[in-house]
Amino acid sequence: QILSPLLAPPGTDFREWIKGVDTLVTFEMAPLHLFLEAHKAGVKTKILVLNIDWTDPRQVLGLCNEVPGVRLWTKGPRTHQIISQLVSDNRKFLKYSVHVDLVPWSIPDPVKRQRFGARGRGDLGGQGAK
């Protein structure tokens, strides 16, 4: 309900809608086509928030190599260290500079070793599928 005024109505042309966006933030996934369209449309800030459990290094490096000005946000010191090292180790292969930021989250959730999807169906990570 809170975000509904900010959402694009069904049938909206994405390429037109994205022209009015100042900042693009995606979580865990790095859809290259989305970031490329956002860049072409003039979106100034493009952020990918990474969760180390779901990060594909090739996808992250591919994004950073194809789209200028990508910022990588990490949610914890260990993730920040890993992603910073990944970028540092591959810097000479990247066309564009990449910013890796450690972003403090306001809610320090405890790590759940076993998470379940809707109605308890399907393991989403942790101890393995049941």
Image: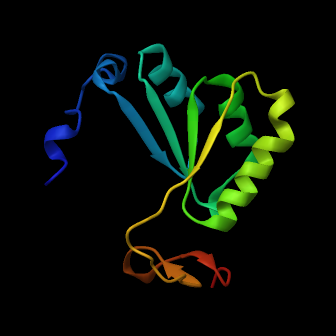
The percent position of residue 123, horizontal first and vertical second, equals: 56, 77
Left or right of 67 in this view: 4 = left
Residue 3, percent from left and from top: 19, 48
Q: Position of residue 80 (x, y in %)?
A: 66, 58
The residue nearer to you, when weighing 80 against 17, is 80
Q: Quarter holding the N terminus?
A: bottom left
Q: Residue at x 64, y 66 (%)?
A: 77
How far across and how far down the image is residue 23, in percent? 38, 33
Q: How many marks?
A: 0
Which color mode does the image show?
rainbow
Residue 46 is at least partly visible in this image: yes
**Is 67 located above or below residue 105 in the figure?**
above
Image quarter (top left, top right, bottom left or bottom right) of the C terminus: bottom right
x 53%, y 76%: residue: 122
Is 45 left, or right, of 86 in this rendering?
A: left
> Relative to 112, does residue 42 appear above or below in the rendering?
above
Q: Is residue 55 above or below residue 4?
A: below
Q: Within the image, what quadrant is residue 65 found in?
A: top right
The residue that appears at 51% across and 80% down in the rendered structure is 115
- In the image, taking residue 83 as reference, residue 74 lies left or right, namely left
Q: Is residue 62 left or right of residue 31?
A: right
Q: Is residue 31 visible?
A: no
Q: Residue at x 42, y 16 (%)?
A: 42
